Amino acid sequence: EAQVTQNPRYLITVTGKKLTVTCSQNMNHEYMSWYRQDPGLGLRQIYYSMNVEVTDKGDVPEGYKVSRKEKRNFPLILESPSPNQTSLYFCASSPGDFSGNTIYFGEGSWLTVV
Amino acid sequence: AQSVTQLGSHVSVSEGALVLLRCNYSSSVPPYLFWYVQYPNQGLQLLLKYTTGATLVKGINGFEAEFKKSETSFHLTKPSAHMSDAAEYFCAVSEGFQKLVFGTGTRLLVSP
Protein backbone atom coordinates (compact mmCIF):
# COMPACT_ATOMS: atom_id res chain seq x y z
CA GLU A 1 0.00 0.00 0.00
CA ALA A 2 1.30 3.43 -0.96
CA GLN A 3 1.80 5.50 2.13
CA VAL A 4 3.68 8.18 4.01
CA THR A 5 4.50 7.09 7.55
CA GLN A 6 5.31 9.45 10.37
CA ASN A 7 6.50 8.70 13.88
CA PRO A 8 5.72 9.46 16.57
CA ARG A 9 2.06 10.29 16.07
CA TYR A 10 1.78 11.93 19.48
CA LEU A 11 4.52 13.41 21.62
CA ILE A 12 4.72 15.63 24.66
CA THR A 13 8.19 16.95 25.35
CA VAL A 14 9.90 19.64 27.37
CA THR A 15 11.51 22.84 26.20
CA GLY A 16 15.02 22.32 24.94
CA LYS A 17 14.98 18.55 24.62
CA LYS A 18 16.02 17.61 21.09
CA LEU A 19 13.60 15.47 19.16
CA THR A 20 13.23 13.96 15.72
CA VAL A 21 10.05 13.19 13.84
CA THR A 22 10.67 10.54 11.25
CA CYS A 23 9.00 10.34 7.84
CA SER A 24 9.20 7.54 5.35
CA GLN A 25 7.47 7.01 2.00
CA ASN A 26 7.30 3.82 -0.03
CA MET A 27 6.39 5.34 -3.40
CA ASN A 28 9.88 6.21 -4.63
CA HIS A 29 8.91 9.88 -4.70
CA GLU A 30 11.55 12.51 -5.29
CA TYR A 31 9.81 15.45 -3.66
CA MET A 32 9.17 15.52 0.08
CA SER A 33 8.13 18.27 2.40
CA TRP A 34 7.18 19.12 5.96
CA TYR A 35 4.21 21.28 6.91
CA ARG A 36 2.85 22.47 10.21
CA GLN A 37 -0.85 23.06 10.78
CA ASP A 38 -2.07 25.65 13.26
CA PRO A 39 -5.64 26.79 13.94
CA GLY A 40 -6.63 29.70 11.74
CA LEU A 41 -3.40 29.53 9.77
CA GLY A 42 -3.89 26.45 7.63
CA LEU A 43 -0.80 24.52 6.60
CA ARG A 44 2.55 26.24 6.23
CA GLN A 45 5.61 24.69 4.67
CA ILE A 46 8.67 24.24 6.87
CA TYR A 47 11.19 22.61 4.52
CA TYR A 48 11.13 20.74 1.26
CA SER A 49 13.46 18.43 -0.61
CA MET A 50 13.66 17.83 -4.33
CA ASN A 51 15.90 14.79 -4.08
CA VAL A 52 18.58 13.16 -1.99
CA GLU A 53 20.90 15.74 -0.42
CA VAL A 54 18.81 18.61 -1.87
CA THR A 55 16.78 20.55 0.68
CA ASP A 56 15.54 24.11 0.98
CA LYS A 57 13.64 26.33 3.38
CA GLY A 58 9.93 26.84 3.22
CA ASP A 59 7.96 29.63 4.84
CA VAL A 60 8.60 28.83 8.51
CA PRO A 61 11.99 27.07 8.83
CA GLU A 62 13.19 28.73 12.05
CA GLY A 63 13.90 26.21 14.78
CA TYR A 64 13.85 23.20 12.45
CA LYS A 65 16.39 21.13 10.56
CA VAL A 66 15.96 18.41 7.98
CA SER A 67 18.11 15.92 6.15
CA ARG A 68 17.63 13.76 3.07
CA LYS A 69 20.25 11.06 3.04
CA GLU A 70 17.99 8.47 1.48
CA LYS A 71 15.21 8.93 -1.01
CA ARG A 72 12.53 7.39 1.17
CA ASN A 73 13.30 9.21 4.45
CA PHE A 74 12.97 12.86 5.40
CA PRO A 75 13.27 13.40 9.16
CA LEU A 76 12.36 16.66 10.85
CA ILE A 77 14.66 17.68 13.68
CA LEU A 78 13.88 20.12 16.45
CA GLU A 79 17.24 20.84 18.07
CA SER A 80 15.85 22.87 20.97
CA PRO A 81 12.05 22.80 20.93
CA SER A 82 10.10 25.73 22.29
CA PRO A 83 6.40 26.03 23.18
CA ASN A 84 5.66 27.94 19.96
CA GLN A 85 6.53 24.76 18.08
CA THR A 86 3.53 23.04 19.58
CA SER A 87 1.62 22.07 16.46
CA LEU A 88 0.37 19.33 14.18
CA TYR A 89 3.06 18.32 11.70
CA PHE A 90 2.57 16.66 8.34
CA CYS A 91 5.09 15.02 6.10
CA ALA A 92 4.25 14.91 2.42
CA SER A 93 5.66 13.43 -0.75
CA SER A 94 5.05 13.81 -4.46
CA PRO A 95 6.18 11.94 -7.57
CA GLY A 96 7.28 15.18 -9.18
CA ASP A 97 7.43 18.79 -8.25
CA PHE A 98 4.58 20.36 -6.36
CA SER A 99 3.28 22.44 -9.24
CA GLY A 100 0.62 20.04 -10.44
CA ASN A 101 1.28 16.63 -9.00
CA THR A 102 -0.78 15.03 -6.30
CA ILE A 103 0.78 15.37 -2.89
CA TYR A 104 0.46 12.48 -0.47
CA PHE A 105 0.32 13.27 3.23
CA GLY A 106 1.16 11.29 6.30
CA GLU A 107 -1.36 11.03 9.12
CA GLY A 108 0.25 13.77 11.14
CA SER A 109 2.29 14.09 14.32
CA TRP A 110 0.86 15.98 17.27
CA LEU A 111 3.69 17.67 19.12
CA THR A 112 3.28 19.48 22.43
CA VAL A 113 6.23 21.36 23.94
CA VAL A 114 5.83 22.32 27.60
CA ALA B 1 3.25 35.35 -3.97
CA GLN B 2 0.20 33.22 -4.37
CA SER B 3 -2.49 33.26 -1.71
CA VAL B 4 -5.75 31.49 -0.99
CA THR B 5 -8.82 32.79 0.80
CA GLN B 6 -11.50 30.46 2.08
CA LEU B 7 -14.64 32.27 3.13
CA GLY B 8 -16.12 30.89 6.31
CA SER B 9 -14.15 28.90 8.84
CA HIS B 10 -17.30 26.84 9.50
CA VAL B 11 -20.14 25.86 7.19
CA SER B 12 -23.21 24.02 8.47
CA VAL B 13 -25.63 22.12 6.25
CA SER B 14 -28.36 19.58 6.72
CA GLU B 15 -28.00 16.08 5.36
CA GLY B 16 -29.19 16.08 1.75
CA ALA B 17 -28.57 19.80 1.25
CA LEU B 18 -26.21 21.42 -1.21
CA VAL B 19 -22.64 21.86 -0.05
CA LEU B 20 -20.81 24.99 -1.22
CA LEU B 21 -17.35 25.80 0.06
CA ARG B 22 -15.80 28.96 -1.30
CA CYS B 23 -12.22 29.48 -2.40
CA ASN B 24 -10.62 32.49 -4.04
CA TYR B 25 -7.00 32.64 -5.03
CA SER B 26 -4.45 35.11 -6.22
CA SER B 27 -1.81 34.03 -8.66
CA SER B 28 0.43 35.81 -11.10
CA VAL B 29 0.56 32.80 -13.40
CA PRO B 30 -2.02 30.25 -14.55
CA PRO B 31 -2.73 28.39 -11.36
CA TYR B 32 -2.83 24.77 -10.41
CA LEU B 33 -5.63 24.45 -7.86
CA PHE B 34 -6.46 21.75 -5.36
CA TRP B 35 -9.02 20.76 -2.78
CA TYR B 36 -7.93 18.50 0.06
CA VAL B 37 -10.09 16.97 2.80
CA GLN B 38 -8.99 16.15 6.32
CA TYR B 39 -11.06 13.74 8.39
CA PRO B 40 -10.57 13.76 12.16
CA ASN B 41 -7.18 12.45 13.23
CA GLN B 42 -6.13 11.80 9.67
CA GLY B 43 -3.86 13.35 7.10
CA LEU B 44 -5.00 15.29 4.08
CA GLN B 45 -6.49 13.47 1.13
CA LEU B 46 -6.81 14.89 -2.37
CA LEU B 47 -10.41 15.51 -3.42
CA LEU B 48 -9.72 16.99 -6.83
CA LYS B 49 -7.37 19.23 -8.73
CA TYR B 50 -7.33 21.58 -11.69
CA THR B 51 -4.23 21.80 -13.83
CA THR B 52 -5.33 22.48 -17.41
CA GLY B 53 -8.26 21.70 -19.68
CA ALA B 54 -11.86 21.42 -18.58
CA THR B 55 -12.73 24.00 -15.96
CA LEU B 56 -15.30 21.80 -14.22
CA VAL B 57 -13.38 19.20 -12.29
CA LYS B 58 -14.95 16.12 -10.74
CA GLY B 59 -13.44 14.53 -7.71
CA ILE B 60 -14.03 11.72 -5.29
CA ASN B 61 -17.12 11.25 -3.12
CA GLY B 62 -19.35 13.25 -5.47
CA PHE B 63 -17.53 16.55 -5.09
CA GLU B 64 -16.76 18.88 -7.96
CA ALA B 65 -15.23 22.31 -8.40
CA GLU B 66 -15.23 24.87 -11.16
CA PHE B 67 -12.26 27.02 -12.07
CA LYS B 68 -13.41 30.54 -12.96
CA LYS B 69 -10.50 32.62 -14.08
CA SER B 70 -12.49 35.85 -14.32
CA GLU B 71 -13.57 35.50 -10.70
CA THR B 72 -10.29 33.92 -9.49
CA SER B 73 -12.41 31.31 -7.79
CA PHE B 74 -12.40 27.55 -7.35
CA HIS B 75 -15.49 26.79 -5.27
CA LEU B 76 -16.20 23.25 -4.13
CA THR B 77 -19.72 21.82 -4.39
CA LYS B 78 -21.65 18.66 -3.76
CA PRO B 79 -25.35 18.35 -4.60
CA SER B 80 -26.36 16.37 -1.52
CA ALA B 81 -24.44 16.26 1.75
CA HIS B 82 -23.90 13.05 3.69
CA MET B 83 -23.04 12.76 7.34
CA SER B 84 -19.73 11.23 6.28
CA ASP B 85 -18.77 14.50 4.55
CA ALA B 86 -18.20 16.19 7.89
CA ALA B 87 -14.52 17.14 7.82
CA GLU B 88 -12.19 20.06 7.25
CA TYR B 89 -11.59 21.13 3.69
CA PHE B 90 -8.56 22.97 2.39
CA CYS B 91 -8.18 24.82 -0.87
CA ALA B 92 -4.62 25.19 -2.17
CA VAL B 93 -2.73 26.73 -5.07
CA SER B 94 0.69 25.80 -6.39
CA GLU B 95 3.42 28.34 -5.90
CA GLY B 96 6.13 27.44 -8.34
CA PHE B 97 7.42 23.91 -8.17
CA GLN B 98 8.31 23.81 -4.52
CA LYS B 99 5.10 24.03 -2.53
CA LEU B 100 1.38 24.39 -2.20
CA VAL B 101 -0.06 27.45 -0.53
CA PHE B 102 -3.05 26.48 1.58
CA GLY B 103 -6.08 28.38 2.72
CA THR B 104 -6.99 28.42 6.38
CA GLY B 105 -9.56 25.67 5.97
CA THR B 106 -13.33 25.33 6.25
CA ARG B 107 -14.90 22.92 8.67
CA LEU B 108 -18.05 21.35 7.24
CA LEU B 109 -20.69 20.35 9.78
CA VAL B 110 -23.53 18.10 8.63
CA SER B 111 -26.63 17.75 10.76
CA PRO B 112 -29.26 15.01 10.44
Image: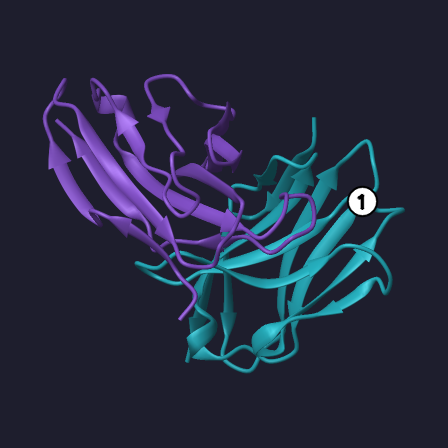
Chain colours: A purple, B cyan
Say what secondary structure mark 1 lies in. loop
Residue drawn where x is 47% and y is 39% of the image: A33
Identify residue for label 1: B72
Front-most of B94 and B68?
B94
Q: For the point 35% across and 23% down, which residue is it?
A: A65
**Given the image, what chain letter belongs to the residue carrying mark 1?**
B
B28 left or right of A52 in image: right
Q: Quadrant of residue B83?
A: bottom left
State whether residue A20 is above or below residue A107.
above
In the rendered image, is residue B56 in sight? Answer: yes
Residue A93: x and y in percent read: 49, 49
Q: Residues within 10 Å of mark 1 (few under 14, many from 20)?
A: some
**In the figure, is residue B32 to the left or right of A57?**
right
Quarter of the image containing the C terminus of chain B? bottom left
Q: Nearer the viewer, residue B66 or B30?
A: B30
Please state the horizontal and vertical placement of residue A52, each as a whole percent of the image: 47, 35
Res. A38 in view:
no
What quarter of the picture does the N terminus of chain B occupy?
Answer: top right
Q: Amino acid at mark 1?
A: Thr
